[in-house]
Image: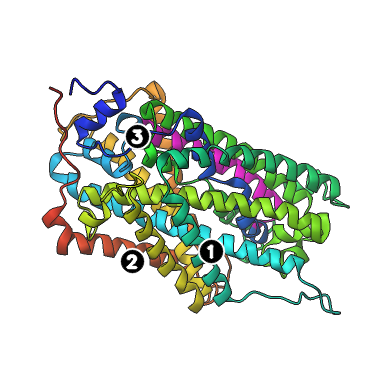
Amino acid sequence: MTTIEDEDERLLARMGYTELRREFTKWSTVSYAISILGVLGSVPATFGSPIAVGGPATAVWAWFIGSTMAMCIASSVAELVSAYPTAGGMYFVAKHVVPPEHVAIWAWVIGWCNFLGQAAGVASLAYSVSQMILAAVVMTSGQHHDGGHSFTPNAVQTVLLAILILCLFGIVCSLTTKALHRVVLWFAPINVLASIGICIALLVLTPNKQSAKWVFTQVTDGSGWGNRGFSFLLGFLSVAWTMTDYDGTTHMSEETHDAAMRGPLAIRLAILVSGLVGWMLTITFCFCLTDSESILNSATGLPVAQIFLNAGGRVGGTAMWFFVVLIQFFTGCSAMLANARMTYAFARDNGLPFSAHLSRINPHTSTPTNAVWLVVTFCACLNLIGIGSRRTIYSIFNITAPALDLSYVAVIVARRVYEGRGTVAPFAAGPYTLGRWSKLFNAVACFWVLFISVILFFPTHWPVDAANMNYAVVVAAAIALFSFGWWWISGRGHFNGSRPVRLEE
C-alpha cells in the first residue's frame, strides 16, 4: 500500500477496487454533473405536462419548489458518497450504514432500484431525442391547404429511431476515459450558453407575449380532479423527471481525480446551475405561450417545438430546436455512462446475471464496454414496448424519478435508523459534510421524496380509464416483486453486498 501515493487510489484499494483510470478533472466533473440533468433538453421534453394539468403558474412554481427540494436530496447524497466515492454509488454506501446481517438485502434492493431507474431514464432520453428529431422533421415539412403538416411520425418510426440513438449513446460511452473527459468538457458550456441565447431569442421574436400576472399567478384545473391545488401538485412531473440521478457523478468517481471532494461539489453546483437555468427556460416558455390550446395540441407532438416555430419560423425555429436536441443527446450519453458504470460496479460485486462477463474491462479502452452494451440492449428492449403501447412506455419512463429517489432515501434513512449500531465498517464522513445541518437536510429530503413519489403515481387526468391511467405504480410493483423474488431465488446465495474492506498495512 505504501506505493499508492494518490489518496483516491489508497481509499479505493482499501475497498478492493483498483481497475479504472482517473482522467476526469474538476471542470469535466462539473460539466458532467450539469449535463446529466440537461435542462435545455429535458425542460422542453416535459413542459407540456405541468402546463396541461395546472397552467403556467404551476409550471413556474413547481420548478422553483422542486429545484429547492432537489438541493436537499442532492446534498444528502453528496455527503454519503463523499465518504465512499466508488462507481457503485448508493448501494455500496449501504454496506456502511446498516448492520452486517442486513447488508446483502439492502445493497441488493438499492442496487436493483438504481439500475432499473437509471435504465428507464436512459430509455426515456433516447425516446425523447427521437421525438425531438421527428418534431424537427414536422417543423420543416410542408403544409397542406388545411394547415396540417405533410409528415406525421408514428410509433414504429419513433421507436426505431430511439434504438438507433441508443446505439450512438453506446458508441460514445465506449470511448476511453481520456476521450470522454475531452468530450464531456463541452457539455455544460453549450447547455448554459444555448439556454441563455434561446431565451433571449424567444422573448425578442415572440409577438403578443403573455403578461407577467398570467405567467406567475394563473393556476388551472386541467387535470379534471376538481381541485386546482391537486392539479398544481401533479405539475411536479417536469422537475421530478429532470432533477434526479444526482448520484450519476458518483458513478464516475473511480475515473475522477479527488473524487471525494470534487464529486459532491459538482453535484451541488449542478443542482444550483440547472435549477436556475431550468426556471429561466420555464418562465420564458410561459411568456411565449401565446395560444396555449393550439400549442399544446401541436402537430409536432411537443409544445415547445411549436413555440420555437411560432417565434422563429421554419428556419429560425429549427435552428433553436437543434440545440435542444443536441443537449438532450448529451444528457442521454451522460445518463448511459452513469448507468453503465453502475452496472459494471454491481456486476463486479456479483449482483447481476453473467457478472463475470459484465465486469470485464476492455483491454483497448480500459473501460467496461460490456456493461455499456448491456445497457444499450436492455434499454432498446424497453423502447420496443412503445410500438405496442405508448401509455405503457410512458409509465415505464415515469418510474425513473421515484425509483432513483427512493433508492437514495433508503440509504439516508438507514444511516439515521441504524446510527450508532454495529456495521460492517463504521461510517466515516468524507471531506464533504453538511455538519450540524445534516439531519435537517436528511429529514427534508426523505419527506419530499416520499411525498412526491405518491403524487407521481397518481393518474394525471380524471375520470381515469385504461387510456389515461398512470401505470407507473404497476411498474413499481413489478420492480419490487422482481427484486425481492430474484433475491430469494438466486441472489441470497451469491451476493453479500460488496467486497470486504481491507485494513491499510
Query: Where are the magenta residues, as a range?
Result: 54-80
Disc count in the image? 3
Residue annotated with mark 3: 81
In the image, residue 76 lies in the stretch drawn in magenta: yes
Cα separation, mark 2 vs mark 1, equals: 22 Å
Question: Of helix, strand and loop, which one carries label 1?
Answer: helix
Q: Name the kind of residue labelled 3 in the image.
A: Val
Residue at image x 73%, y 52%? 320
Residue annotated with mark 1: 127
Percent across and percent down for residue 22 are 36, 33
Percent across and percent down for residue 303 are 70, 61
Between disc 2 and disc 3, whose residue precedes?
3
Does residue 489 show up?
yes
Percent across and percent down for residue 94 are 26, 41
Q: Name the kind of residue labelled 2 in the image.
A: Ala
Q: Name the kind of residue labelled 1 in the image.
A: Tyr
Magenta segment main secondary structure: helix
Residue 478 is tagged as 2
